Amino acid sequence: MYGDGGSMMGSGIYSEDYTGFFYCRPCDDEFELDGTTDDWKSTAYAECPRCKSELEKDISNEGPDEYDRADEAWKDRD
């Protein structure tokens, strides 16, 4: 049994692919990269193509993507 009553949140099982712009402080440059989110979809991670640093981006205030909006519209039809 899981410590919080059965949730696997935090294990990475609910992470999703993410594409966006990430700023690399060591390179002082911004890159459009493919990465992944955390389980809560509040932070995205990618690797800098130049210096290989792990980049982190707060995405908690970004709006839902098209898939989420379509899913919500479908739910509202009932």
Image (cartoon, grey):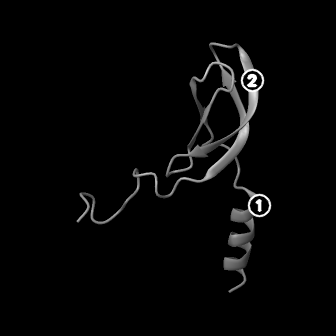
Between the C-alphas of marks 1 and 2, the distance is: 25 Å
Which residue type does callout 2 highlight?
A: Glu
Using the rendered view, name the quadrant where residue 52 is placed: top right
Which residue type does callout 1 highlight?
A: Glu
- Which residue is more in the foreground, 51 or 20? 51
Q: Is residue 70 left or right of residue 38?
A: right
The residue depicted at 57 percent of the width and 23 percent of the height is 53
- Which residue is more in the foreground, 31 or 77? 31
Residue 54: % across, % down: 55, 28
Residue 32: % across, % down: 76, 34
Q: Which residue is mark 2?
A: 30
Q: Which residue is mark 1?
A: 66
The residue depicted at 56 percent of the width and 49 percent of the height is 41
Judge depth for marks 1 and 2 and give the one in front: 2
Instruction: Please tell me which of labels 1 and 2 falls first in the chain.
Output: 2
- Which residue is more in the foreground, 21 or 46? 46
Q: Which mark is residue 37?
A: none
The image shows residue 27, relative to residue 55, as above or below, that is above
Q: Quadrant of the C terminus?
A: bottom right
